Amino acid sequence: MELIPNSIPQDSVERSVFQTMTTDVDLESGVYILRKLDNGKVEFVNVSKIDRDVFSSKEVGRTIKAEKERLELFKRVGEEWSATGKMVDLAARGARQYLRYQASPTFIT
């Protein structure tokens, strides 16, 4: 019997998917839209924590529209949202399957 190995080295996967940064801001976990600014700064919006009425307000709309790069990012995120959701779902499914495989390994006989 032979245990089926992972097809991609774990450290390679982690480096290509997960990135870290140090911040003085107390960020909550959630779904973010992140925009790179100058001088190593970033602008982020935690879309999972914003009140729907506030996020869809005229004021927020004006703020988004006021900067071309911000508006373009929001448009792109809107267009990619469905595909992004599917990618997250695939990753979650892969994690669930991996946990099942750890509990009872698959063997080739």
Image: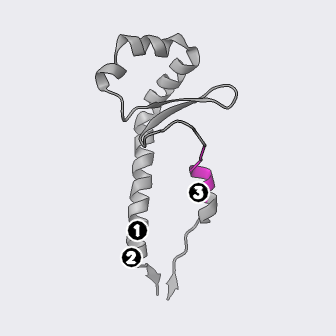
Residue denoted by label 3: 14
Q: Report x, y in % for residue 20.
A: 59, 47
Q: Nearer the viewer, residue 44 or 88?
A: 44
- Label 1 CA crowd tier, 10 Å (few <14, some 14–19, many 20+): few
Magenta range is 13-21
Q: Tell whether label 3 touches label 1 (CB within 8 Å).
A: no
Task: Identify the mark nearer the N-term, 2 or 3.
Answer: 3
Taking the spot 43% from the left edge, 61% from the top edge, the residue there is: 95
Residue, far right? 39
Compared with residue 63, is residue 23 higher up or lower down, i.e. above or below? below
Secondary structure under tag 3 reads helix
Taking the spot 60% from the left edge, 43% from the top edge, the residue there is: 21
Residue denoted by label 2: 103
Q: CA distance from mark 2 to mark 3?
A: 22 Å
* Amino acid marked by disc 3: Glu
Secondary structure under tag 2 reads helix
Residue denoted by label 1: 99
- Label 3 CA crowd tier, 10 Å (few <14, some 14–19, many 20+): few
Q: Report x, y in % for residue 6.
A: 55, 69
Compared with residue 4, is residue 72 higher up or lower down, i.e. above or below? above
